[in-house]
Image (tube, rainbow, N blue to C red):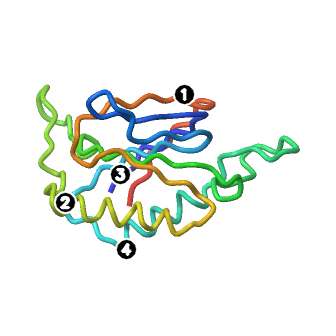
């Protein structure tokens, strides 16, 4: 499982020109499910993301608060291309990506685990859809997390 985390001041996701998810201050999480990923890995990753300290305190202390501490918002977007490999040739190989039906189950589980943090607002894109994602990166802060 691979997550590309971007700290944002705002973000939205649209399908067919209609915004289906929109957040303010928080994270956009692009999540790629790899063949063999487990619910235990998804739970650990959700917990790690909730506890990461990437927000400054009100007094200005750098990386002092987590997204839970600031009662932030999260936009989760499925992105199977994170499973891609460019080691051979010029065309990405996505064979490591989990089958869509199994990936969707794990994606939904990951979203539920994040939603267990009552102070967080969690929005999503549409699994498997072609989406337009707009965001304003804060920092910029971008991390790749995997389990």
Q: Indicate which label's residue lies in the foreground, 1 or 3.
A: 1
Of 3 and 14, the residue lying toward us = 14
Q: Residues within 10 Å of mark 2 (few under 14, many from 20)?
A: some
Outermost front residue:
18
Residue at (24%, 59%) from the top-left corner? 104
The residue indicated by pointer 1 is: 136
Report the side of 30 relative to 96 (left or right).
right
Task: Name the spot of residue 82 as percent of width and height, x first.
Answer: 29, 43
| Secondary structure category for the residue under label 1 | strand
The residue indicated by pointer 3 is 2
Q: Does label 3 or label 2 sit earlier along the sequence?
A: 3
CA distance for labels 2 and 4 = 14 Å
Residue at x 44% of width, y 28% of height: 134
Of the numbered discs 1 and 3, the one sitting upstream in the chain is: 3
Mark 3–mark 2 distance (CA, rounded to whole Å): 11 Å
> Which residue is label 2 attached to?
35
Q: Badge 3 local density, few (<14 within 10 Å), some, or many (20+)?
A: many
Name the spot of residue 73 as percent of width and height, x first: 57, 49
Image quarter in which the N terminus is found: bottom left
């Amino acid at each position: 499982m691979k997550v590309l985390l971007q700290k944002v001041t705002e973000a939205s996701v649209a399908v067919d020109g209609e915004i289906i998810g929109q957040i303010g201050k928080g994270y956009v999480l692009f999540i790629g499910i790899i063949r063999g990923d487990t619910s235990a890995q998804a739970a650990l990753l959700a917990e790690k993301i909730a506890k990461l300290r990437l927000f400054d305190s009100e007094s200005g202390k750098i990386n002092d608060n987590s997204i839970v501490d600031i009662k932030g918002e999260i936009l989760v977007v499925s992105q199977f291309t994170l499973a891609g490999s460019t080691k051979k040739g010029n065309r990405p190989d996505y064979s490591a990506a989990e089958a869509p039906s199994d990936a969707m189950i794990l994606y939904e589980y990951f979203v539920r685990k994040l939603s267990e943090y009552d102070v967080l607002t969690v929005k999503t894109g549409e699994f498997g859809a072609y989406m337009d994602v707009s965001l304003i990166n804060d920092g910029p802060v971008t991390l790749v997390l995997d389990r």
